[in-house]
Image (cartoon, rainbow, N blue to C red):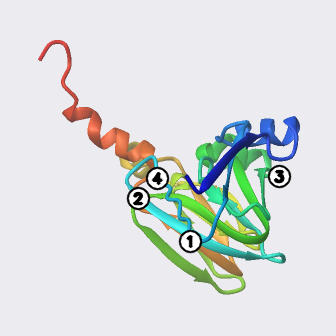
Amino acid sequence: KGMKMDTSTGGGLLKGIGRALSGDTIFLNFFTAQEDNQQIGFSSCTPGKIMPIRLNGSNTIIGQKNAFLAAEESVEVDIHFRNKLGTGIFGGEGFILQKFTGNGIVFLEIDGEVIEKDLAPGEKILVDPGHIAAMEESIEFDIERVKGAKNILFGEGLFFARLTGPGKVWIQTMPISKLAEAIIPFIPTSSG
């Protein structure tokens, strides 16, 4: 009763198409309280966490494809491409990302639990690219190939994301792709 909803592209058709390329929809829903003391709730599409991040106009957050859940109207949601070809080809889920700027709160969907890590200048960590939920724009992101025949034959994957500080990184423990792989053996088939 006290909440009004409008739908638009949120900045024009090109902005909407950019969001669609990064895993969201062309159209955004805008909710406005028509009177005091109104509340609205949003839920995640997959098991995991909803993570609020405050943007202050000078910090930029880069998120995984499909990370965006909701934000204040003063937050800009754009597509973000990795600028290195190798990152795009071998980074899989990490190639087309979402970029969040502005002044306000953005709410991100994180698959599974979230591990927050502050990287010091020059500090490096290696992460499966699908486990990167979000990072500050100051983080340098590159792809590193796993070395060694045993690792290639018996390992989880062939490539790691190398993240170099300074900045904050949010790592998700159960990307939806890994959750799907874990569930497949339990799905009944037509043969029983």
> Residue at image x 46%, y 54%?
43
**Structural crowding at the residue carrying mark 3, measured as other residues with C-alpha within 10 Å and reported as few (<14), some (14–19) or many (≥20):** few
Residue tagged 2: 48
SS under mark 4: loop
Q: Position of residue 177 (x, y in %)?
A: 44, 42
As measured in the structure, the alpha-carbon distance from the residue carrying label 3 to the one carrying label 2 is: 29 Å
> Residue at image x 88%, y 40%?
12
Residue flagged by tag 3: what amino acid is it? Asn
**Nearer the observer, disc 3 or disc 2?**
2
Q: Position of residue 150 (x, y in %)?
A: 39, 50
Residue tagged 3: 83
Q: Position of residue 180 (x, y in %)?
A: 36, 39
Q: Are the residues at dot 3 and dot 1 in contact (C-beta closer than 8 Å)?
A: no
Horizontal relation, residue 48 to residue 67: left or right: left
Residue tagged 1: 37
As measured in the structure, the alpha-carbon distance from the residue carrying label 4 to the one carrying label 1 is: 24 Å
* The one of 135 and 85 positioned closer to us in this rendering: 135
Query: On screen, 45 above or below 117?
Result: above
